[in-house]
Image (cartoon, helix red, strand yellow):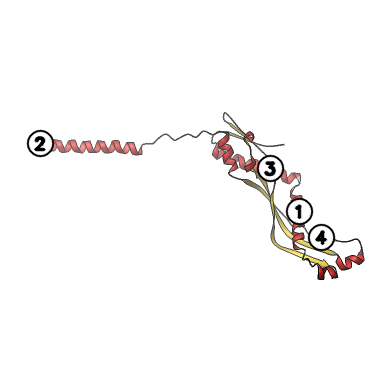
Amino acid sequence: MKLWKVYLSLGLALALFLGGGVAGWAIFHPRPSATRTVDANVILTALRDRGFLVTETYVFDEPVTITKSSGSAFKDFFFGQTITARGAMEVNEGVDLAKLATEDVSVQGETVTVTIPRASIFNSTLVGPLDVQNDQGILKRVLQSDDGYNEALAELSTQAQAAASKPELIQKASDNAKEEITRLLGFVAQGKTIVVRVAP
């Protein structure tokens, strides 16, 4: 009778051990990783989600002079105005990836090709203080006083954007965009050859 109990205990212990092993394997065994198909839509979504990709920042610090003259020294004595201003303007350039279209992305076998627009100006902002000197005619100062701040800021922004639009600076921002997008797509389409081109 005692021997029967021993066999029963051993059988139960073995059954529990084997059952636990099977349950553990079923729960924790490595499963094959789900493979994601990288197609043009996946690439397009990944790029569009980045919005405007800033790839180059320039800072310009050049003075501007705005002269409002009637052409008559007598009239200018009363109503003329000369605004002189100086301030550092930051201009950001890059590529608006949100505007990419389906035809800009191609996936052929192991090669992903993306065509991006040339870099353009994103914005220009004043960095630090704006020093404005405003010389107004006697009557203008009294009747039409204008501190000249807004006009000076607008002119500084216009000049900075014009300076940042030089071909060599646009080219540098475009080249940086190609490098950045290539790096980004290296994570999205791992193992594939990435070709990024700038539209003519």
**Looking at the image, is mark 3 or mark 4 nearer the viewer?**
4
Mark before the other along the chain sequence, 2 or 3: 2
| Label 3: element kind | helix
Mark before the other along the chain sequence, 2 or 1: 2
| Label 4: element kind | strand
**Looking at the image, is mark 2 or mark 1 nearer the viewer?**
1
Count how many numbered circles sit on residues in the image.
4
Report how far apart the C-alphas of labels 3 and 1 lie in the structure: 21 Å
Quadrant in which the N terminus is drawn: top left
Residue located beneath label 3 in the image: 174
Percent coordinates x, y for residue 187 in the rendering? 54, 40
Percent coordinates x, y for residue 28 in the rendering? 35, 39
- Badge 4: residue crowd in 10 Å (few <14, some 14–19, many ≥20): some
Mark before the other along the chain sequence, 3 or 4: 4
Residue located beneath label 1 in the image: 158
| Label 1: element kind | helix
Q: Is residue 177 above or below residue 136?
A: above
- Badge 1: residue crowd in 10 Å (few <14, some 14–19, many ≥20): some
Query: What's the residue type where badge 3 is placed?
Result: Ser
| Label 2: element kind | helix
Numbered badge on residue 65: 4
Report how far apart the C-alphas of labels 2 and 3 lie in the structure: 86 Å
Mark before the other along the chain sequence, 2 or 4: 2
Residue located beneath label 2 in the image: 3
